[in-house]
Image (cartoon, rainbow, N blue to C red):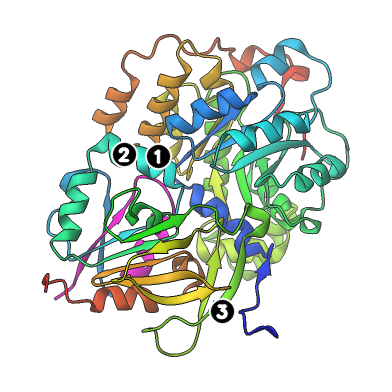
Amino acid sequence: MDENGQPRRDEATFTVKAGLAEMLKGGVIMDVVTPEQAKVAEDAGAAAVMALERVPADIRRDGGVARMSDPEMIQGIQEAVTIPVMAKARIGHFVEAQVLEALEVDYIDESEVLTPADEANHIDKWAFSVPFVCGATNLGEALRRIGEGAAMIRSKGEAGTGDIVEAVRHLRMIRSEIRRLATLDDAELATAAKQLQSPLHLVRQIAAEGRLPVVLFCAGGIATPADAALVMQLGAEGVFVGSGIFKSEDPERRARAIVEATTHYQDPARVAAASTGLGQPMVSLETSKLEAEQLLAPRGW
Amino acid sequence: MTKLVGVLALQGDFEAHAKMLRALGARAREVRVPDDLRDLDALIIPGGESTVMSLGIEREGLAEPLRELVRAGTPVLGTCAGMIMLDRDHLGLLDVIARRNAFGRQVRSFEADIDVKGVSGGPMHAVFIRAPWVAEHGPEVEILGSVEAHPVAIRQGHMLAVSFHPELSGDSRLHELLLAIDGSGE
């Protein structure tokens, strides 16, 4: 209790940061570039929106340096919707993150989709009140991000392709590495922490609990309701959809369908119904045909 | 007799509630369609995004079956978005209006120890995430706990609602209270 007899409030604790991700579980977080798109996403059942200046498919097409969005656009999106608004900062660009915190976005995505600002260091996420979500391709990467203060993890996948193969690889990798840790004894866990280049206390915690200490979503390449249900069955706790919605023929309908398939991911009849009559998906790229310098997932480490 | 508790599982942290119920020896069933409501002894509407839950309830045709279940006397607990779903503007079961995101955006989310009437053994450790509060309430609504004079825990007969997330702080006393409510419809 404080001097006014009111309970003491502790803000920005890790419980509160990771807690918002708990509330987003089973939901779809949609990339939007305008307040109008944000409204369409909210009305279709998005659990949150991700504000960015260009969706990954356009970043891929146009090239150039991809940065944090214009604050005016982010504020316009915050005024347009009541669901949480996330926004992306470049890897290591802690001032973009400070700006996003000043704007009171609900979550910051330190994202490989934008052009990295620091080749050696990620943002010290413990220094912020606003929570962070970060991408990972494997368990070691996920644990390094959590060690730096990330309160939510997503697979990286290969953004802007509409090809689910990389997200599947990353999810399977993270889950199988978690299962392997559960079979190791204490001495082996210390070695595993070295191999994973991860904090030992997190490795021990995961071995004991059999799951990440934060919520795990899937991102990167989801284009259809069946893609969303696939990654949910593989253990994702929710999905991010980037280019897959607003680069498709009928964004509103596809958005609703992906929300429905994410809720009913264990029911093939419902996924079938949701997949019916959606029009064309986004124009897609086969990841294995991309040149190494076109890949986004190797950014960050 | 082991109680069977439905947890609305359209979106949100329904698994945390199910885990807590099982730890208390109850059975938990995820509810996504009206058929999942049969034979329930109690119901929980979890935290999550209230807009997503509203759309899901509409899409699945769950509004009327949920109302019938609760009006028949089945005890219900709503947490955060669950409180919103029960209010006058949504399912219309609780005689309250919940103000969404009343404490502010995520940077204003907080933890605090709150005294809750009817919950013995000291204050509850409460986690508030973009939480609502009760902005208006009718005479049948009993205020169980408040933060800065805003009601955050209420009871109306067999219906309980809180703005915070007991399922995230490991405090199962509200779930015990739910399981102890007589659901005979008296």
Q: Chain of mark 2?
A: A
Asked if disc 2 and disc 3 are in contact, CB closer than 8 Å, the reply is: no
Against A201, residue A85 (above or below) is above
Within 10 angstroms of label 1, few (less than 14), some, or many (20 or more) residues? Answer: few
Q: CA distance from mark 1 to mark 2?
A: 7 Å
Q: Residue furthest front?
A: B139
Q: Where are the magenta residues, as a range?
A: B1-22
Q: Residue furthest bottom?
A: B121
Q: Which mark is residue A266?
A: 2
Q: Residue at x 38, y 56 (%)?
A: B82
Residue for badge 3: B113
For label 2, the SS is loop
Q: Is residue B18 left or right of residue A254?
A: left
Q: Residue at x 53, y 21 (%)?
A: A244
Q: Residue at x 56, y 29 (%)?
A: A38
Which label lies toward us, 2 or 3? Answer: 3
Within 10 angstroms of label 2, few (less than 14), some, or many (20 or more) residues? Answer: some
> Measured from the top left, where is residue A104 in percent x and y?
71, 47
Dividing the picture into quadrants, the one containing residue B118 is bottom left
